[in-house]
Image (cartoon, rainbow, N blue to C red):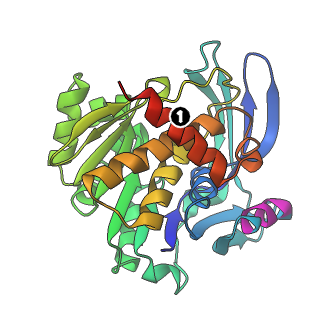
Amino acid sequence: MPLLVVGSVALDSVETPSERRDDVLGGSAVYFSYAASYFAPVQLVGAVGDDWPAEHTALLRSRQIDTAGLEVVAGAKTFRWRGKYLPNMNDRETLEVHLNVFGDFDPKLPATSRQARYVFLANGSPRLQLGVLEQTPQAVLRVADTMDLWINIQRDELLALLRRIDGVVLNDSEARLLTGDENLVRAGHRVRELGPKFVVIKKGEHGAMFFGPDDTYVLPAYPTPNVVDPTGAGDTFAGGMMGYLAESGDLSPAGLKTALAYGTVAASFCVEDFSLERLKRIDRDDLNRRVDEYRRMLSF
């Protein structure tokens, strides 16, 4: 079943304690769509400037990602982010952000995308995300990501969004900020009380927490020893999760848990190189093998 993602498409510059890469392919919709493409057809909606390298679009299309909704705005520049990771590889400093074309992004979905049954609203303005919901009335699963910026400056719109979606993905600090509760278990339940059927709290190297109507559990991160660049790991996690759900159509508690496992494993590959480089070197069999290893790790 086709899966729609609407979000940022970017050029990133990343510094780690040992290496640096400039102007590499990034953005929430890019990481999400690439990971999800291992499971289901993906429709990507975003905007770039005329500085966008054509080879990046060709790469996405090589994964059967539909880029009909990727708008190239003449005379504009692509969203750019520059960040630096600290030695622990968990904390990072944002050195520069240039929203450029993404600052005025107001997506008008292609006709095929308006029929999407599975919709992921990648990190962006809640106003933008609500606008996408208005254009996708046939969706059976609507999941959104958010961040501290929108909690602070568009809280009312975010609360309206939460009442209209099935699931939300956010990190631990965002859950605490949204609810005012330092206890993550209570915070997760309180986010769910705001509207979504399920809540996923990302905890970086410590995995993810799931809160549903019948289940609350923690899945650890896959223990990869080779963390090169964590950029995009959260979006890759979401792509693996939603890709599996779109492929299987299984929204049962067991299906959701399996989807989280695939998201966790997809993210573990992402962090092993810069940008999409590690994801480009794997296939579905690699994901399945690592999920099997992960399942054995969690059995006792």
- Residue 24 position within the rendered picture, expressed as x and y whole percent measured from the top left: 78, 44
Q: Amino acid at mark 1?
A: Glu
- The quarter holding residue 230 reads top right
Q: Secondary structure at mark 1?
A: helix
Question: Which one is nearer the viewer's eye here, 215 or 111?
Answer: 215
Q: Nearer the viewer, residue 69 or 58?
A: 58
Point out the stretch of residues depicted in magenta. Answer: 55-61
Q: Residue at x 74, y 69 (%)?
A: 61
Q: Quadrant of residue 277?
A: top right
Left-right relation of 198 to 266: left
Residue that numbered label 1 is attached to: 293
Residue nearest the viewer, comparing 259 with 164? 259
* Residue drawn 47% across the image and 58% down it: 244
Q: Quadrant of the C terminus?
A: top left
What secondary structure is the stretch in magenta mostly built from? helix
Q: Is residue 160 left or right of residue 244?
A: left
* Residue 124 visible somewhere in the drawing: yes
Measuring 71% from the left and 26% from the top, which residue is drawn there?
228
What is the x, y in percent for residue 163?
A: 21, 59
Q: Position of residue 7 (x, y in %)?
A: 54, 58
